[in-house]
Amino acid sequence: MPYLADRSARLYYDDSCGPCRFLARAAEGMSHHRVEAVPLGAPAADVELGALPVETRYGSAHLSIDGALRTGDGVPVPLLGLTLGPRWEQVARKVPIADRALRSTYVRLWKVRQRSGCGAKTAP
């Protein structure tokens, strides 16, 4: 496992949502720990997300790669590359239906999360 300083990305997720927590931890493990899963409300998230309005911060997942922040449906494709490898990300970017499927799956899961009353409604 790489040292924490070697991690190339951070995935900010809603820790109060069971499926979100499961998917974030799965992404962390599948990426061989290149991705660090960090709860949205964790003090460590303040460094990159502290300037965001509360609604934005808790309104979607965020992925930070080398200081560039991707939010919402911009997360799945680069996360795919980090977890399964860059070739998978290239395929998703070059095949429009794959890109749309990943984005729409994210949106559907996030809507379920919001309806279920996960962290989006209980944000500090």
Image: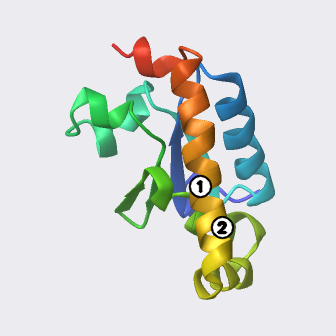
Measured from the top left, where is residue 25 in percent x and y? Answer: 72, 40
Query: Nearest the camera: 97 or 94?
Result: 97
Measured from the top left, where is residue 2 in percent x and y? Answer: 70, 59
Residue 14 versus residue 102 in the image, above or below? above
Query: Nearest the camera: 82 or 75?
Result: 75
- Residue at the image position 41 percent from the left and 67 percent from the top: 66
Residue that numbered label 2 is attached to: 82
Q: Measure how far apart labels 2 and 1 are at the Cα level.
A: 19 Å
Q: Could you say whether the residue bearing mark 1 is in a helix, strand or loop?
A: helix
Where's the N terminus, which quadrant?
A: bottom right
Q: Tell whether 83 sits left or right of 9.
A: right
Measured from the top left, where is residue 95 in percent x and y? Answer: 65, 84
Query: Nearest the camera: 60 or 38?
Result: 60
Q: Looking at the picture, which amino acid does disc 2 mark?
A: Leu
Q: Is residue 48 visible?
A: yes
Total of numbered circles in the picture?
A: 2
Q: Looking at the picture, which amino acid does disc 1 mark?
A: Ser
- Residue at the image position 33 percent from the left and 13 percent from the top: 124
Q: Can residue 46 be seen in this view?
A: no
Q: Tell whether 44 sits left or right of 93.
A: left
Residue that numbered label 1 is attached to: 104
Residue 53 versus residue 94 in the image, above or below? above
Residue 58 versus residue 74 in the image, above or below? above
Q: Quadrant of residue 67?
A: bottom left
Colouring scheme applied when the structure was drawn:
rainbow
Q: Could you say whether the residue bearing mark 2 is in a helix, strand or loop?
A: helix
